[in-house]
Each structure stands twice: as C-alpha cells, then as structure tokens.
Image (tube, grey):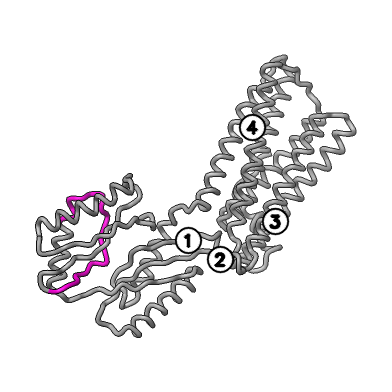
C-alpha cells in the first residue's frame, strides 16, 4: 500500500521523459505547459478509472457509500479539467488587452482548486458532526473495503506525481492538485479505519475521525489559498532573484550602485523588473545609454525576464559631495528605521545650496504614511541644525525588493 518516494521519482521521470519532448528545459514556456497538461491528464485517467469501477460496483451491490465516493472521484475529474484549462489559457500569447500575457490564469485555477478542497473539508466536517450527534452503525462491507484499499495507493501515487511536477516547475496549480489527491487518501483511510472498528466492535468512531480529517483538509486548503493569493496580491520577490539581478547589474563597468528595484510577477515565467542604476555624470550620455542597453539585454536573456533600467547620474570626485555624504551618513545612524540612502547630490551655488537625496525605509518597519513624512522632516531639521548652510530635499522610499 505504501509508495517509496525514491521509486516514485524514478517513475515520474520515466513518464515525463516518454511524453514530454526536451523535458529538462523547464524554463521553456511550452515545455512547462506540457508538464501541466501531462499532470492533468494523469489525474483525469486515475479519477475516471476509480469513478467507473466504484459506480459499477456500487450499482451492482446497491451501496450508496460506494456510489457517493464514485461521484467524489468525478468531482476530482473536474479539478483536473480546471488545471488543464488553466495551463492552456495561461500560455496564451500576449495581446492588446494583456500585454504581459495570461500567466496569472494559472494562479486563478489553483485558487479554484483550493476552493473545491475547502468546500470538501467543510462538507466533511458538517457530515461528521451530524454523525456524532446521531450515531449510526457502520456496516462492514468486504467489497467496499477492497475498493478503498485499491484506491488509496492510486490516489497516493497521483498526489506524489502532481507534487513532484508542481515542485519541479514551481506550479501552485499542480501543488493544489497534489494536495487534493492526498486529502482523498486521508478520507479513504478514515473510512477504512471506521470499517475495521465496526467489524470488530460496536464502537462508532466514524464521526470523530471525520471531524479530524475535515479539519486537516481545511487547513491544507487555507495554506494553498495563501500560497496562491500572495503572488496575485504582489508578494515580495525571491531574495535570491534580487541578489542575482543586483550582482549582474554591477558587472557593468559604468554602474556604481543599484536601488529602487521593483519586480512585477505576471505569472510563472513572466516577470518584469525595473531599477535605478547609479552612473558617473561625466561619461557621455550615448556611451552610458549603450552600456545600459547591453545590461538590460544581458539580464533579460540570462534570467528570461523583461528589464527596464533608469539611469541616475552621480557626481563623483567632488570633495564637497563626499564630505556632505559622510556627515549625512553619520546623522542617519540616529534614525534606525532608515535602511540606506541614495541619489545623493548637491545643487545650487554660493549660500543657496540644497542637499537632495532619497532614504529607504524597509517594510518590516511598521510606520504610517504620516510618520514617514515626519521622519523625512525630522532628518531634514537635524541636518540643517548641524549644517545650516544647506537646505534639504528628502524623498522617503520603501524597499520593494524585500531585502
């Protein structure tokens, strides 16, 4: 009845290699779509087989329980269809209405499957509570027992198959399908346990086991929903991706620093990034433009993402600017909520000079917009108090990169 994880991975790889051309190239959108289609078809096949077997036997022996479980498998078929449609729609090319493609459809299909899992959990708890309030004897039926013993390894294998592929291609939809199949294993196991207890005693544990399994199903559904909703709401990007982008940008010999990095997720494999690159002010603009274009192209090709870089010229080699940056840096140490500062420059002549720069406050600092504005004013007042010959223009930024 148990499936060894190592052998399961071997079987998954064997099936994938037989049905998906160039299966190792998961960065390719078409290959990724084929993974999703294969997984959905496997779910369709397994659940349809169980549906036909259980429905036929249920009608033959006149068992409502077996027929009910048959239609539960039919509901799982609908989840596989939703996943299949989600993968097909998410890979549609960009159009006028959706210039960044339809990748988020995959998140929506995962959310819909998660909602189905949640509904199953709620209904299971509801039925189980009624069974606790009004206990009914559970009759042991050998045929039902055998059917469930056959269904468990099939559902368990399907769960591992979907989870392995979901992890490989980072698909929330397939992870949800894997969790759905695993929940079926829990349900079948609880029914088998109840049948075994009823065969050897008069104790009814049916309702209590059902409540426990229902709670487990709801818990998994809520976690799946959270994992699916987060990217739709705009979750913080992967820190490793952020580090890779900054590292690749700084390989360009004219880029001195990177800030205001924003990553937009339009679905798996469909990402747009933008950031500000600090460049020397005294290099010809056409040279800088060419270097920035080369960097955009290099990052885009290596990471398969759309890149936009904004240039921020820096005045380098100025003793006055260097000195001003040093004392501003020292003053900012008295403001622990400030993570860093950038775009530092001095404008004006004579006594009419302004320090202009941005400060960065990370999102883990819980502070209102009003307090953010006051923070900028407090820093400005402190700088002017210590160095009255300067005025200040301070912009307060948030760190959208998450690190």
Q: Say which quadrant the N terminus sits in.
A: top right
Callout 4 secondary element: helix
- The residue segment tinted magenta is 331-349
Q: Position of residue 361 (x, y in %)?
A: 30, 53
Q: Residue furthest front?
A: 352
Callout 3 secondary element: helix
Res 122 label: 4
Q: CA distance from mark 4 to mark 3?
A: 26 Å
Residue 67 belongs to the span the image colors magenta: no
Is label 1 or label 4 in front?
1
Q: CA distance from mark 1 to mark 4?
A: 35 Å
Please indicate whether residue 223 sits to the left or right of residue 247 in the image: right
Mark earlier in primary sequence (4, 2): 2
Q: Residue furthest top?
A: 202
In the rendered image, which residue does mark 3 sit on? Answer: 85
Q: Taking 58 as reference, is 251 above or below it?
A: below
Res 100 label: 2
Q: How many neighbours does mark 1 have within 10 angstroms: few (below 14), some (14-19), or many (20 or more)? A: some
Mark earlier in primary sequence (3, 2): 3
Q: Position of residue 340 (x, y in %)?
A: 26, 58
In the rendered image, which residue does mark 1 sit on? Answer: 264
Please indicate whether residue 399 sits to the left or right of residue 328 in the image: right
């Amino acid at each position: 009845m148990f499936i060894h994880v190592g052998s399961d991975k071997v079987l998954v790889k064997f099936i994938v290699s037989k049905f998906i051309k160039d299966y190792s190239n998961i960065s390719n959108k078409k290959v990724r779509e084929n993974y999703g289609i294969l997984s959905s078809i496997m779910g369709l096949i397994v659940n349809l087989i169980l549906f036909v077997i259980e429905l036929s036997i249920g009608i033959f022996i006149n068992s409502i329980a077996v027929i009910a479980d048959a239609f539960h498998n039919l509901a799982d078929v609908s989840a596989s269809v939703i996943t299949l449609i989600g993968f097909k729609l998410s890979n549609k090319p960009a159009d006028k209405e959706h210039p960044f493609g339809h990748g988020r459809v995959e998140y929506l299909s995962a959310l819909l499957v998660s909602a189905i899992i949640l509904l199953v959990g709620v209904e299971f708890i509801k039925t189980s509570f009624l069974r606790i309030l009004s206990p009914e004897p559970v009759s042991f039926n050998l045929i039902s027992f055998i059917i469930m013993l056959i269904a468990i390894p099939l559902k368990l294998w399907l769960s591992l198959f979907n989870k392995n592929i979901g992890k490989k291609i980072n698909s929330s939809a397939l992870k949800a399908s894997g969790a759905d199949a695993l929940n079926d294993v829990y349900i079948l196991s609880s029914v088998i346990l109840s049948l075994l207890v009823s065969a050897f005693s008069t104790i009814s544990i049916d309702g209590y086991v059902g409540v426990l399994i229902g709670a487990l199903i709801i818990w998994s559904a809520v976690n799946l929903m959270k994992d699916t909703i987060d990217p739709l709401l705009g979750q913080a990007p992967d820190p490793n991706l952020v580090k890779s982008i900054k590292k690749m940008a700084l390989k360009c010999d004219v880029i001195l620093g990177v800030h205001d990095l924003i990553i937009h997720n339009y679905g798996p494999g469909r990402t747009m990034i933008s950031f500000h690159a600090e460049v020397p002010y005294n290099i010809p603009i056409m040279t800088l433009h060419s270097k920035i274009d080369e960097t955009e192209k290099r990052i885009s090709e290596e990471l398969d993402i759309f890149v936009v870089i904004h240039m921020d010229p820096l005045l380098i080699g100025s003793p006055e600017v260097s000195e001003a940056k040093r004392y501003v840096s020292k003053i900012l140490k008295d403001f622990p909520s400030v993570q860093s500062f950038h775009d530092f420059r001095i404008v004006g002549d004579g006594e009419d000079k302004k320090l202009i720069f941005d400060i960065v406050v990370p999102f883990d600092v819980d502070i209102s917009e009003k307090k953010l504005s006051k923070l900028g004013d407090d820093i400005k007042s402190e700088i002017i108090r210590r160095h009255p010959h300067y005025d200040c223009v301070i912009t307060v930024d948030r760190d959208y990169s998450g690190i």
